[in-house]
Image (spheres, rainbow, N blue to C red):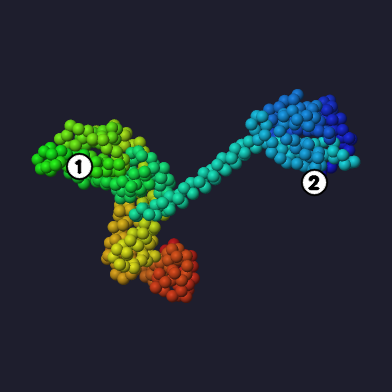
Amino acid sequence: MQTRKTAYYHSNAEHIIGDIQNPLNILLDAVLESSYDGIFITDGNANTIKVNTSYEIISGLKQSDVVGKNMRDLVAGGLISNSGTLLALEKRQPVTLEQKFKTGKQALITSTPTFDDQDNIVMVVTNVRDITEIWDLRNQLDKKEELTKRQLSELEIIRKQIMGVGNMIAEDQEMLQTMLVINKVAPMDTTVLLLGETGVGKEIIASYIHQNSPRRNRPIIKVNCGAIPAALVESELFGYEEGSFTGAKKDGKMGLVEIANEGTMFLDEIGDLPLDVQVKLLRLLQEKEIQRIGSTVARKVDVRIIGATNRDLQKMVEAKEFRKDLYYRLSVLPITIPPLRERPDDILPLAEAFLAELNLHYHFQKKFTPSAVYEIQSYEWPGNVRELRNVIERAVILSSGENIQPRDLGIFKEKSADPDALSSSNQDINLKQILMDIEHEYIETAYNIYRNVRKAAKSLSMDAATYVRKRRKYGGSSAYSAAKS
């Protein structure tokens, strides 16, 4: 849209703007210099007649570089990359474009032509807005979006990879981020230390790392260091020669480390290793060699060590219960597996996977009721994945019929009425409202799980019409809760 001005400038804008004694020009200067945006003004022939200080700061050009010079010459000389003024003169309408200056600043410029009564362009005013900060933010946002897309793709690949690894389930973002690190570590033939509470699944993670490593076609030997008597740990791990000690086998014995040669050794509860055995483990990690008990010959072995512990090794080092040099050698790539309570989106998928496995094993067709699902998701699982599996197995074995109820899980305390509390209460107990509240909770829980009226009704052994009628009756609030409030 064209901007028209009646003949104030006659046919020559420079007649007024170029006259520094003109009171209007003094006022115009004050206005232009107060602008945070750069201002660049040319006459109708693209001759530069005025720029403000903000333009100098943004562009890095001085007034002496541009004033009195034609825009075509400035572009040809490379002082200005592209000109909104020339486009505005050509198109006879406002033009907006992006411009980059030698200062590195990015600007959004708008060049607006001004016309006289005869429809001649007498002046082009260009507004130059510094958008460097916005531009940088946009670039950062683009990079973050690209990174997010790449990470989502990686997480999807991880989901597909872990589907075939035993009970390896990862749906929660916290666990998927951990798996992202594990996926990068697995192919690298280096020592890994898995940290985390008891039962978080460190052994499963160790198997996953082995299966995604170059050693996948060789054995993985799993050793629970805490389960072997201290007197036998060294001989079990490193073996012994004939006659090394009373009771030793005639031909000696190969240790588990040698059996794992070219493969992986998973040392669970590595914090329980005796100090004298830690010395030998350090030698294995540093020199890639071992020495059987009773032998003077060092044997070369090629084995990848994955250690795991639920103990604070750093505190054990301070207490001189664990060797500092071994601790630092093991801690090259420490990975902490989050507890189940910090990965809530994994709880139900794990429970359902365990249920499917147990149904197959025991030839059952059992399923969780909505209230059982609610209890499973609400429980904090202090024993983590191991506890979850044990609870599901117990429920499968002890439950009557095909439906697993909350009482079958045994993870919550049933509320019992306290006769003394009831007798001392000044309020009557409305049993009808309590029962309504319980019914309402089951109805809503079923719907939240199945998001389908027929499926929710079926899970409660209720026909769909009755389910809809009762759900409409209760609405979105609990009768009992409403009564109490």
Q: Is residue 446 visible?
A: yes
Quarter occupied by the C terminus: bottom left
Q: Position of residue 402 (x, y in %)?
A: 33, 69
Q: Is residue 483 left or right of residue 119?
A: left
Figure disc tally? 2
* Residue that protrudes farthest toward the top in the picture: 64
Q: Quadrant of residue 112?
A: top right
Amino acid under disc 1: Met
For the point 43% across and 71% down, the residue is 457
Q: Is residue 426 or residue 214 the one in the foreground? A: 214
Q: On the image, numbered disc 1 is attached to which residue?
A: 254
Q: Position of residue 188 (x, y in %)?
A: 38, 40
Crowd class of label 2 (few under 14; some 14 to 19; many from 20; radius 10 Å): few
For the point 89% across and 35% down, the residue is 10
Q: Is residue 319 visible?
A: no
Question: In what element is the residue under mark 1?
Answer: loop
For the point 86% across and 30% down, the residue is 15
Crowd class of label 1 (few under 14; some 14 to 19; many from 20; radius 10 Å): some
Q: Is residue 77 left or right of residue 255?
A: right
Q: CA distance from mark 2 to mark 1?
A: 91 Å
Above-or-below relation of 289 to 150: above
Q: Is residue 213 left or right of residue 244?
A: right
Q: Is residue 335 or residue 36 the one in the foreground? A: 335
Amino acid under disc 2: Met
For the point 34% across and 44% down, the residue is 215
Q: Earlier in the sequence, mark 2 or mark 1?
A: 2
Q: On the image, numbered disc 2 is attached to which residue?
A: 1
Q: Position of residue 279 (x, y in %)?
A: 23, 33
Q: Position of residue 28 (x, y in %)?
A: 79, 32
